[in-house]
Image (spheres, helix red, strand yellow):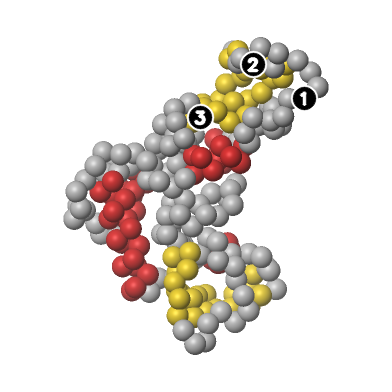
Amino acid sequence: MITFKLNGQTVQGEKGQYILQVAEKYGVDIPTMCHHKALDPAGMCRLCTVEVFDGRRTRYVTSCNYPIWEGMEVKTDTEIVREGRKLIVEMLLARCPEATAVQALAKSYGIEKPRFQTGDDTCILCGLCTRMCERIGAMPAPPPTNTISASVSLAKNSPKGPDTMAVSPGFREKIQDDTMPGGTSSPAPGGGVAMRTLSMTMPFSSGKFAIE
């Protein structure tokens, strides 16, 4: 086990774990918008940034993908960390003023109206939709039969294009709604991506898709 300080408390985690994982274990809340337990951490939203002291200097790292090490000192809610998160949330609110997840974060940081020019986007650029599609798997290699049945997820409004298709290598295996943030049917906190699962038959001979 690895022992270190988390907000002044002595905590332990296993080798290979990240700060965010250990923080969750000990009930320490760190906000995230691009993190999902079914996916590898990406550190894209930067909201989970925390302060790490190594005995000589302080650095700021994304807790979702920063591995723990012996003797480190982590602070998750310093003034500098809060101000950095507040700025990120304010920019997100300006970009996606109607996104409920962003509105909730803005309220928690006391932001009523962003200082920046507002838009009407619903995508917070968390990358969850594309990463989720990649995790489910792109088109699998053709099996030794003429057709297969598969579960298909169509990601509406994905940055990769409308109706981005991802087919599970397990054919009938799919990511259930309860694996999405907040138990919703969208992998994106902003709600800009609607997932719908369809059954389909794929005739490899013709190279066309017949969606049932």
- Looking at the rendered image, the quarter that the C terminus falls into is top right
Q: Is residue 174 above or below residue 27?
A: above
Secondary structure of the residue carrying numbered label 1: loop
Q: Which residue is mark 2?
A: 207
Q: Which residue is mark 1?
A: 143
Counting from the top left corner in percent of width and height, residue 9 is at 53, 78
Going by the numbered disc 3, the residue's amino acid type is Thr
CA distance for labels 1 and 2: 14 Å
Q: Which residue is mark 3?
A: 164
- Mark number displayed over residue 167: none
Mark positioned earlier in the residue sequence (3 or 2): 3
Q: Could one spot residue 194 in this view of the protein?
A: no
Mark 3, Cα crowd under 10 Å, few <14 / some 14-19 / many 20+, is: some
Q: Is residue 79 above or below residue 71?
A: above
CA distance for labels 3 and 2: 17 Å
Total marks drawn? Answer: 3
Going by the numbered disc 2, the residue's amino acid type is Gly
- Corner quadrant of residue 48: bottom left
Relative horizontal placement of residue 145, taking residue 111 as reference (left or right)? right
Counting from the top left corner in percent of width and height, residue 2 is at 66, 75
Contact, mark 1 vs mark 3 (Cβ under 8 Å):
no
Residue shown at 44%/72% (left/top)?
Answer: 60
Residue shown at 31%/61% (left/top)?
Answer: 86
